[in-house]
């Protein structure tokens, strides 16, 4: 440091010396001393710049300049608090929403799996025939060259009853082959995982606990290994506990069982999805593995009874974790916030251009004192980067709030939501985005401003900017930026309007039942398990009777599945006369029929309901009758089908009196006594599927929702209904109490999530574009006060002045809208997966949005333009 | 100032100024003004040294250790900064001169035949 300082002092001295000598030379040539001195100075050139360039030889100088620039930049920002606040807040919003959505994408899409080298993990599914993997797993393992390791599992957790502490508890269970733990690369926290011989039927009465279950049910007792646990009525030995992060394949899992264990066999009623997980060898892609599996599948020669060939599909486990729909939705949101950020950038670029124009004099002085152009650009870009950095910091804080908001808004089923946080990846992303942003909005204004016309700018009294920057450049650049902003806002607004309209379409969809004044009480099934058949029937009968008798209740009924909510039991249904032998079908055979899409069988939802269900729900019975109290054990088994199933099984319409069989778990022939109107059974936006209704007095079903139609607002009766339930059975718990409207809004929680976010982003975009237009017009008015004064003095009318100040902005707005519409036409196809009942090129949206934007731009430019009308010609001219 | 017409003067090629400074200092230590004048004088005023490049060049050479700077008393008895060739600078001068000879020779070989062709 001191060395450099001495060098610089030497340089000063040397330059003075040089000029003195040159002066001396000039005097010797015969010049008068004063002229000789000036000639020497002129000949030497810009002393400051030469010193500066010499300083740069010493390398640290750049850092020093950066430090200088930073201090200077901070001073400039502090000097202009209005501009700084607007710019930093705009940036903080732009960067904040990006950091928020990126943190979601980072967790859900990029790093959904907490396993080492998760990118090498793949899931293998068998498309045709489903559920055949266990039979071919061994063959694949022997023949494959692309997998390091490979193991099968059931992908969807199923329920297994744990009879412990005198009470039955439902645990979520997943079957895994012993290899799965090794494939995922996770060691148990305590004990061990499964041994190979534990997959042999009868050998696998062992269980591995999840960290959560271990904490909850065993109080983190390290001595749990070797304990026995009664699962599904059989004794199992706890052999291991997995570490906290291990949540395969989802967080709900409480226990893992080998596929052969009695409990897991018992819990499998209908067809569960089977999947194998594999770890690819390093350098092998999913595509190569797919190619190899195709060959292996051919080689294994597995063939179903209906002639179906094996069809194995490989997909990255990371991609499967979030599911393609969620991935796509999040990426679309990331695109939307990208647009918001671009808008913020162009907004600030516009502000900077105007501000730099006001600073022309200052910049010209710097240039005159020896600042080179690159040096000026560097200074101005440093200021932009400073702004971006401040915006980024504030944006991170905003993102913390944003993440919190997303947690509240997001669908509870969105995986891994609790993992969403601002981690190193998100920080790095935010930093890079901030810096890029700073460069993006800073570089253009910096170049435009760094080439001042020194003479013009430094002239006494000159306001500088317009003359200095060249009359054409400034409005053109600002005009282009305005067009950009309007185009970007158009795209986002169109996207938002389409998504919001989809939501309203979803909400107004025909339900097939009356959703008003309907209370849904979901009863906890565990508490009914303990009751014997008679007690259990009595319990429900008593609850129904007492609730029906409550004042304010119109009607009450039971249903095994809450209507219009996702889930429920799907079973294969056969119609009479065409089933092969009319008796119990083997699971394998059932599978074959299903896969073959056999016209004699159909997957249908089984809904077990009490007699007054149809009356309570106000679902019309189209043919035949509803259920009555007489449809109970001992009387002939009956069923009611919905329209969809009736149409598929008996297209000619003669339905009542036919017989059908609802599959292997309850193999009995039921007479169809009625056809019910289609009612939504899967959540809003889903077409009603085939449904078979059975009377609750003929089928033992554990899980019921109590549906209460009221004449008063339904919440008011919640307390009384709960009282009646607990008086019928004090141990009976209730899972949830909701109005049907709340149930419905839950089923559109994803569309709601999109709509809320998209609307917010579009609102930001509209706001930013409006502020941009406002800023440009108000700047232009302030610059042209003088000109406007002269025009008014010469007799220009208000309309002429308005046209003068906002004409160009409106032209640019129109141009922007047109460009935006064009781009939106291409882009909305990408969001078609988020749309429901609205075409991606919906005409009303494509016409309405431009009108709204045009009006917003008009308003944003009219407010500052009015100031132009208030210009007093006399004052304006006096300024001269 | 100069006797030559402005248009006859040639701006120095990038990097050649370093070579010329080293060569000038081979004759003995000199101050900045003297170096510039010497180069202009020796080239019959064809080469013009821009001060804008002279001082950065001098400091570049100092940084590389090819020249050093020290206080001295000039011929008219005033204190001045004298630049002096170091031992490394001397070796570098040989290298640079050699390089320049090769470059000049090569360019000359390319240009010569063209002139001859033009004459014939």
Image (tube, coloured by chain):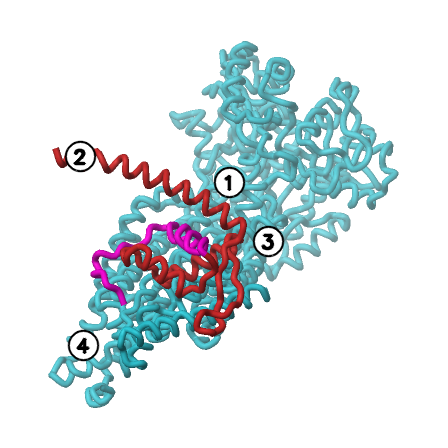
Q: Secondary structure at mark 2?
A: helix
Separation of marks 1 and 4 at Cα, in angstroms: 61 Å
Q: Secondary structure at mark 1?
A: loop
Separation of marks 3 and 1 at Cα, in angstroms: 36 Å
Q: Which residue position holds label 2?
A: B116
Q: Which residue position holds label 4?
A: A801
- At label 2, counting other C-alpha atoms closer than 10 Å, the crowd grade (few under 14, some 14-19, many 20 or more) is few
- Drawn side of residue A799 relative to residue A676, left or right: left
Q: Quadrant of the C terminus of chain A?
A: bottom left
Q: Which residue position holds label 1?
A: A682
Residue A47 x %, y %: 39, 70
Q: State which region is magenta.
A: B1-27
Whether residue A798 is situated above or below residue A306 in the rendered picture: below
Q: Secondary structure at mark 4?
A: helix
Residue A767 x %, y %: 38, 65
Q: Chain of mark 2?
A: B
Camera-nearest residue between A129 and A458:
A458
Given this view, does label 1 or label 4 mark the residue nearer the observer?
4
Q: Is residue A436 magenta?
A: no
The chain in red: B
């Amino acid at each position: 440091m001191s060395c450099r300082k001495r060098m610089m002092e030497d340089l000063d001295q040397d330059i003075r010396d040089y000029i003195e000598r040159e002066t001396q030379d000039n005097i010797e040539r015969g010049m008068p001393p004063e002229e000789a001195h000036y000639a020497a100075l002129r000949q030497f050139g810009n002393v400051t710049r030469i010193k500066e360039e010499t300083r740069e030889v010493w390398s640290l100088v750049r850092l020093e300049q950066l430090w200088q620039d930073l201090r200077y930049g901070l001073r400039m920002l502090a000097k202009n608090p209005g501009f700084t606040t607007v710019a930093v807040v705009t940036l903080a919003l732009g960067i904040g929403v990006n950091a928020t959505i990126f943190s979601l994408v980072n967790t859900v899409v990029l790093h959904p799996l907490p396993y080492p080298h998760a990118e090498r993990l793949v899931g293998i599914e068998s498309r045709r025939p489903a559920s055949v993997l266990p039979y071919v797993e061994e063959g694949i393992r022997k023949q494959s060259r692309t997998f390091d390791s490979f193991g099968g599992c059931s992908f969807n957790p199923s329920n297994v009853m744990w009879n412990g502490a005198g009470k039955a508890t439902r645990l979520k269970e997943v079957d895994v082959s012993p290899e799965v733990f090794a494939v995922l690369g996770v060691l148990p926290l305590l004990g061990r995982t499964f041994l190979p011989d534990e997959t042999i039927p009868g050998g696998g009465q062992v269980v591995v606990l999840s960290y959560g279950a271990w904490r909850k049910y065993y109080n983190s007792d390290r001595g749990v290994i070797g304990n026995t646990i009664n699962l599904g009525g059989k004794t199992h030995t706890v052999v291991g506990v997995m570490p906290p992060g291990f949540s395969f394949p989802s967080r709900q899992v409480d226990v893992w069982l080998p596929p052969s264990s009695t409990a897991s066999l018992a819990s499998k009623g209908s067809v569960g999805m089977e999947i194998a997980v594999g770890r690819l060898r390093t350098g092998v892609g999913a595509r190569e593995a797919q190619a190899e599996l195709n060959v292996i599948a051919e080689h294994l020669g597995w063939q179903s009874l209906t002639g179906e060939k094996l069809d194995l599909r490989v997909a990255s486990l990371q991609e499967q974790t979030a599911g393609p729909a969620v991935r796509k939705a999040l990426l679309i949101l990331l695109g939307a916030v990208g647009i918001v950020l671009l808008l913020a950038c162009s907004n600030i670029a516009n502000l900077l251009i105007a501000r730099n124009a006001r600073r022309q004099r200052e910049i010209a002085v710097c240039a005159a004192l020896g600042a080179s152009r690159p040096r000026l650009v560097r200074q101005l870009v440093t200021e932009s980067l400073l702004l971006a950095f401040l915006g980024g910091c504030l944006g991170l804080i905003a993102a913390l709030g944003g993440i919190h908001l997303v947690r509240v808004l997001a669908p509870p089923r969105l995986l891994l939501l609790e993992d969403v946080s601002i981690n190193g990846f998100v920080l790095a992303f935010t930093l890079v985005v901030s810096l890029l942003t700073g460069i993006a909005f800073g570089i253009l204004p910096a170049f435009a401003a760094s080439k001042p016309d020194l003479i013009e700018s430094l002239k006494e009294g000159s306001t500088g900017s317009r003359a200095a920057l060249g009359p054409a450049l400034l409005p053109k650049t600002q005009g282009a930026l305005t067009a950009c902003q309007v185009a970007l806002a158009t795209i986002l607004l169109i996207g938002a309007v389409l998504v919001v309209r989809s939501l309203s379409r979803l909400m107004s969809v025909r339900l097939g039942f009356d959703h008003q004044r309907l209370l849904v009480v979901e009863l906890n099934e565990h508490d009914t398990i303990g009751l014997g058949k008679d007690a259990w029937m009595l319990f429900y009968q008593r609850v129904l009777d007492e609730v029906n008798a409550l004042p304010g209740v119109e009607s009450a009924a039971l249903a095994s599945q809450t209507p219009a909510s996702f889930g429920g039991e799907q079973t294969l249904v056969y119609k009479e006369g065409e089933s092969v032998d009319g008796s119990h079908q083997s699971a394998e055979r059932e599978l074959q029929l299903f896969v073959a899409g056999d016209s004699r069988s159909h997957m249908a939802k089984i809904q077990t309901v009490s007699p007054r269900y149809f009356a309570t729900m106000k679902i019309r019975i189209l043919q035949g009758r509803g259920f009555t109290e007489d449809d109970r054990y001992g009387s002939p088994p009956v069923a009611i089908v919905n329209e969809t199933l009736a149409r598929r099984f008996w297209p000619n319409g003669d339905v009542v009196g036919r017989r059908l069989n609802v599959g292997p778990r309850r193999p009995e022939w039921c007479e169809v006594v009625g056809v019910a109107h289609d009612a939504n059974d899967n959540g809003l936006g889903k077409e009603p599927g085939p449904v078979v209704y059975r009377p609750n007095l003929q089928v033992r079903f554990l899980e019921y929702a109590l549906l209460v139609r009221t004449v008063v607002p339904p919440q008011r009766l919640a307390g009384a209904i709960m009282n009646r339930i607990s008086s019928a059975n004090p141990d009976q718990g209730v899972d949830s109490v909701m109005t049907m409207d709340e149930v419905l809004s839950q089923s559109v929680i994803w569309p709601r999530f999109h709509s809320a976010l998209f609307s917010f982003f579009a609102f930001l975009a509209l706001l930013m574009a409006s502020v941009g237009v406002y800023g440009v017009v108000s700047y232009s008015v302030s610059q042209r006060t003088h000109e406007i004064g002269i025009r008014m003095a010469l007799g220009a009318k208000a309309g002429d002045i308005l046209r003068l100040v906002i004409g160009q902005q409106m032209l640019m707005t129109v141009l922007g809208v047109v460009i935006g519409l064009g781009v939106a036409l291409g882009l909305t196809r990408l969001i078609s997966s988020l749309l429901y009942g609205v075409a991606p090129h919906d005409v009303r949206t494509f016409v309405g949005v431009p009108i709204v934007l045009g009006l917003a731009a008009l308003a944003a430019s009219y407010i500052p333009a009015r100031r132009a009308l208030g210009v007093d010609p006399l004052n304006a001219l006096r300024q001269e | 100032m100069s006797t030559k017409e402005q248009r006859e003067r040639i701006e120095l090629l990038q990097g050649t100024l370093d070579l010329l400074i080293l060569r000038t200092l081979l004759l003995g230590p000199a101050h900045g003004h003297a170096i510039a004048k010497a180069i202009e004088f020796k080239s019959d005023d064809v080469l013009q040294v821009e001060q804008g490049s002279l001082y950065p060049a001098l400091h570049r050479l100092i940084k590389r250790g090819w020249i050093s700077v020290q206080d001295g008393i000039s011929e008219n008895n005033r204190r001045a900064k004298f630049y002096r060739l170091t031992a490394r600078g001397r070796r570098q001068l040989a290298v640079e001169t050699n390089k320049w000879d090769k470059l000049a020779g090569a360019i000359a070989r390319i240009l010569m035949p063209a002139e001859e062709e033009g004459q014939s």
